[in-house]
Image (cartoon, helix red, strand yellow):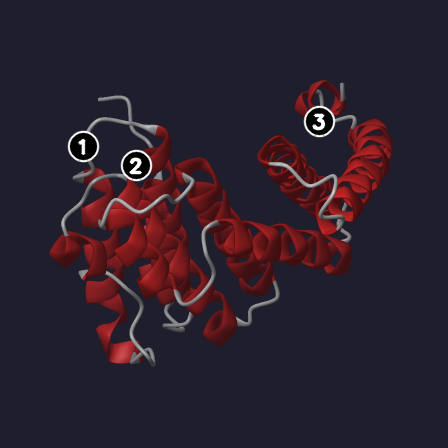
Amino acid sequence: MGQCHYSYRAYDLARTCLLGALRVRKHRVSQLSDDDDDSDISTQSNRDSLYEEEVALGGLFFGLGNIHMQLGDHAQAMQNFIESRDMRWRHVGGGSTDKILDRYLSGSSVDEDELLGLAHCLHNIGLLFDMKEEYHRSLPHYDEALKIKNVIAGFSSSESTALLAPASVNPKENVSLVLRSLEEDLELPQVTKATLSVSMTHKKMASIYAKVSDSVSLYCFYLILSCPCDF
């Protein structure tokens, strides 16, 4: 119901629904966690149920983050995205992004949906910093998100690292960075849930490179290139 309200932009109603669902999920997670701590009750079935509830809880945090972002409450949105990120990070094994992706590529048991969900959280955290014009903080989050999305989309390691954000942005290089980012976006293969998400992160990174260049003409050029055309 909350998602339905969100799709119709009834954000207050959507928030009310998701907050209600959040309370129920939190209670379930707490109950199952207590059972898991009890060696007499703990079973594989119980652990599976706990994981499923936590996955749903992470999704609710993410949904609330989107709602609060639409309502302009960016501080609460950031908190929600961080809560979702931390839960999903734990679900994919923890550690650095590189270590998580190494496990994923080696065939270890890594939940792909949670991994992509982690990338979405990182992207949205980067977006909030982007909106605050804290580009030095947004780029690393876009960077991490892009790493994950590229690997899930099936790109090679060279492709997945070709356009990661540099440690520092040289304004003189921004023209080439914008062009490279948009070029990578245009060359993406068939649309999947991963490649579509990669495309969005490419555009956001290109936008930052354009904005921090202090060049109005470069930013306008970015806007023209990033708009879909019907010819």
Query: Secondary structure under badge 2?
Result: helix
Q: Position of residue 174 (x, y in %)?
A: 27, 69
N-terminal label among 3 and 1? 3
> Horizontally, is 152 left or right of 189 in the view?
right
- Do labels 1 and 2 touch, CB within 8 Å? yes
Give the residue number, with chain letter if any, for mark 3: 6
Q: Furthest residue to the front?
A: 40
Give the residue number, with chain letter if any, for mark 1: 189
Q: Position of residue 13 (x, y in %)?
A: 85, 27
N-terminal label among 1 and 2? 1
Amino acid type at image mark 2: Thr
Q: Residue at x 23, y 74 (%)?
A: 173
| Residue 221 visible at all | no
Q: Position of residue 20 (x, y in %)?
A: 86, 32
Query: Secondary structure under badge 3?
Result: helix
Q: Residue at x 34, y 51 (%)?
A: 148
Amino acid type at image mark 1: Pro
